[in-house]
Amino acid sequence: MLERNHFGGNWTEHKTSILETYAKQFLTVFKNQPRQKLLYFDGFAGSGDIDIKEETDEEESFRTIEGAAVKILKVDTPRAFDMYYFVEKNKGLAKSLKTKIDSEFPNKQCFIQASDCNEKIKGLSKFLRSQGGKTYKALGFIDPKGMQLEWSALESLKGLPIDLWILNPTSGANRLLA
């Protein structure tokens, strides 16, 4: 059986919808530049689907929504990304995402890594530097559930052609302020 993410609420739907809208605008900038290669990087990709607890007074129920990875893979206009790189440390969730992508998006160039996001961000940095900052432009989405993100990983992206979205959970930062 495939694993799924179980978290969030209405804000999760809003967040992924806003990311999808931004991605479409990002792609619009490059719609008339077919030689410009575009890469999407998701550092905490999950399983592709999210089971969200319904807000009811009755018994507990869940409904399933598409995660950010699936929403971004469905964007084909004004153009699609040329490459997708998904990182999910949980091997079961990464396997579920790979199964979903292989089934629903067989023609997309996707890489799914069951690994630590920080190491893969540093790898992304090396890849973009090796391209001289000209071949690929990237859109990155980093949405950890806790304080897993290391500053050194983010620092490695300095000066590179990447629009980076970082959603930082304030609860973890608040604990560190004490």
Image (cartoon, helix red, strand yellow):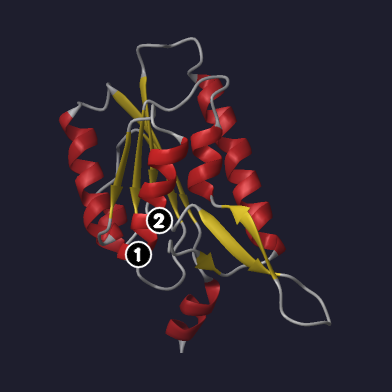
Please identify the residue farthest to the right as the structure is shown: 57
Report crowding for label 1: few under 14, some 14 to 19, many 20 or more residues within 10 A (C-alpha): some
The amino acid type, in three-letter code, at marker 1 is Gly
Label 1, label 2: how far apart the Cα atoms are? 6 Å
Specify few, some or many for label 2: CA neighbours under 10 Å numbering under 14, 14-19, or 20 or more: many
The N terminus lies in which quarter of the figure?
A: bottom left
Q: Nearer the viewer, residue 53 or 163?
A: 53
Residue at the far front in the pictured view? 1
Q: Position of residue 126 (x, y in %)?
A: 17, 41
- How many numbered circles are shown? 2
Task: Let me know if residue 163 appears in the view.
Answer: no
**Residue 134 placement: quadrant:** top left
- Determine which of the numbered discs, if any, sits on residue 92 in the image: 1
Would you say 127 lies left or right of 99 here?
left
Q: Which mark is drawn over residue 96?
A: 2
Q: Residue 60, labelled with which disc? A: none
Quick one: which residue is furthest to the bottom in this view? 178
Image coordinates of residue 103 in percent, x first then y, are: 43, 39
Mark 2, secondary structure of its residue: helix
Left or right: 26 in relation to 89 = right
Depicted 15 relative to depicted 8: above or below: above
Residue 101, how many percent across, how many down?
41, 42
In terms of secondary structure, where does tag 1 sit?
Answer: helix
Q: Amino acid at mark 2?
A: Ser
Task: State if disc 2 and disc 1 touch (CB < 8 Å).
Answer: yes
126 vs 45: above or below: above
Residue at 44% over, 64% down: 3
